[in-house]
Image (spheres, grey):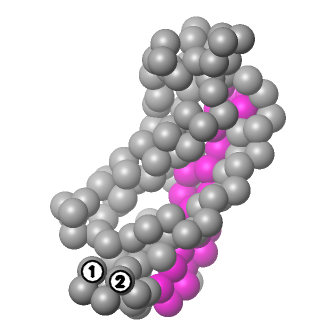
């Protein structure tokens, strides 16, 4: 398991399950979104409506199934800061086991033009300091 600076506990809901009693693969993406929103809210301490980002890329590797009785935690952090984008890395954990690993690339967007724009300097500095990135 990797070390991350932020963790979010997830409650598995009955509606998350597929016919075999496992969390459906698409629901893992919702768990990542929940963790990502929690991270940005906690670390940047701004209104989420003021953060204009889109997920431009998502990669996920499933390593074990999750069931209704599992205690799930998503551990995550920013692993790379670009000019107008940043990469977040995740582990979806069941206890000490890793159920999935994932990576998303977020792109900062200009609401008026709908085009990528450089990240706010204060946000960049806060993320870099929290993650220990240069």
Secondary element at tag 1: loop
Classify the position of the C terminus by image quarter.
Answer: bottom right
Q: Which residues are the magenta region?
A: 76-99
* Quadrant of the image occupied by residue 27: top right
Residue visible at 65% across and 44% down in the picture: 91
**Which residue lies most toward the right here?**
63
103 sits to left or right of 7: right
Dot 1 alpha-carbon crowd within 10 angstroms: few under 14, some 14 to 19, many 20 or more: few
**Residue 2 visible in rendering:** no
Q: Which mark is residue 114?
A: 2
Query: Where does the image place residue 106, in percent across and percent down from the top left?
Result: 50, 70
111 sits to left or right of 115: left
Classify the position of the N terminus by image quarter.
Answer: top right
Residue 108 lies in the magenta stretch: no
The residue pinned by badge 1 equals 111
Dot 2 alpha-carbon crowd within 10 angstroms: few under 14, some 14 to 19, many 20 or more: few
Report if the CB atoms under discs 2 and 1 are less than 8 Å apart.
yes
Query: Where does the image place residue 115, in percent across and percent down from the top left?
Result: 40, 87
114 sits to left or right of 84: left
Residue visible at 57% across and 12% down in the picture: 68
- Chief secondary structure of the magenta span? strand
Query: Where does the image place residue 20, in percent across and percent down from the top left?
Result: 71, 11
């Amino acid at each position: 398991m990797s070390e991350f600076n932020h963790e979010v506990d997830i409650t598995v809901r009955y509606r998350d399950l597929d016919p075999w009693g496992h969390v459906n693969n698409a629901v893992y993406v919702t768990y990542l979104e929940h963790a990502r929103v929690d991270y940005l809210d906690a670390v940047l301490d701004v209104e989420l409506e003021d953060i204009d980002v889109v997920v431009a890329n998502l990669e996920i590797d499933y390593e074990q199934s999750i069931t209704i009785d599992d205690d799930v935690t998503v551990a995550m952090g920013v692993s790379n800061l670009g000019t107008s984008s940043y990469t977040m890395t995740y582990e979806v954990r069941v206890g000490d086991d890793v159920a999935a690993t994932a990576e998303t690339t977020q792109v900062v967007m200009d609401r008026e033009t709908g085009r990528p724009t450089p990240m706010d300097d204060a946000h960049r500095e806060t993320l870099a300091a929290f993650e220990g990135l240069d």
